[in-house]
Amino acid sequence: MAMAAAADARYTMDLVPALKEAAIPTRLVWGREDEFQKVTFARRYTAQIPASDLREVPGKHIPTEDSPEQVTEAILDHLAA
């Protein structure tokens, strides 16, 4: 429950101004079937954050458990770029 409470979308939104200012390459990796923080949140973030992109992967709120290979690939591809 503590983890779920800490994942409130408002905390993520609080990061947007700093990410806009930093303008560093940012990749969001999001579970396509996330019912807690829907992928529409991620699409909104990438629209607001310069130099960002989104990689949707199969899975729900913790895609590292649902799709570890796809998450790893998304991170490694981003770091290689």
Image: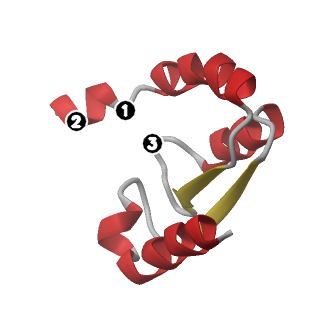
Answer above or below: position of 27 versus 37.
below
* Nearer-the-camera pick, 57 or 34: 57
Residue 60: name its quadrant: bottom left
Q: Are marks 2 and 1 in contact (CB under 8 Å)?
A: yes
> Residue sitting at 58 percent across and 46 percent down?
38
Q: Quick one: which residue is furthest to the left in this view?
A: 1
Q: Could you tell whether 43 is left or right of 59 in the image?
A: right
Numbered marks: total: 3
**SS at mark 2 in the image:** helix
Q: Are marks 3 and 1 in contact (CB under 8 Å)?
A: yes
| Residue 58 showing in the rendered view | no
Tag 3 secondary structure:
loop
What residue is rendered at 41% in x and 26% in y?
8
Label 3 vs label 2, nearer the camera: 2
Query: How far is mark 3 from mark 1, CA to CA?
Result: 9 Å
Quadrant of the drawing holding the N terminus: top left
The answer to whether the residue labelled 3 contacts the one labelled 2, judged by CB atoms less than 8 Å apart, is no
Q: Nearer the viewer, residue 61 or 48?
A: 48
Image x and y of residue 49, in percent: 75, 34
Badge 3 amino acid? Phe
Would you name the residue on which mark 3 appears? 36
What percent of the width, then of the height, locates residue 7? 37, 32
Q: Which residue is at 69% across, 69% downward?
A: 81
Q: Which residue lies under the disc numbered 2?
A: 3
The numbered disc on residue 7 is 1
Who is closer to the viewer here, 34 or 3?
A: 3
Mark 1: few/some/many CA within 10 Å (<14, 14-19, 20+): some
The numbered dot on residue 16 is none
Say whether disc 3 or disc 2 marks the residue closer to the N-terminus: 2
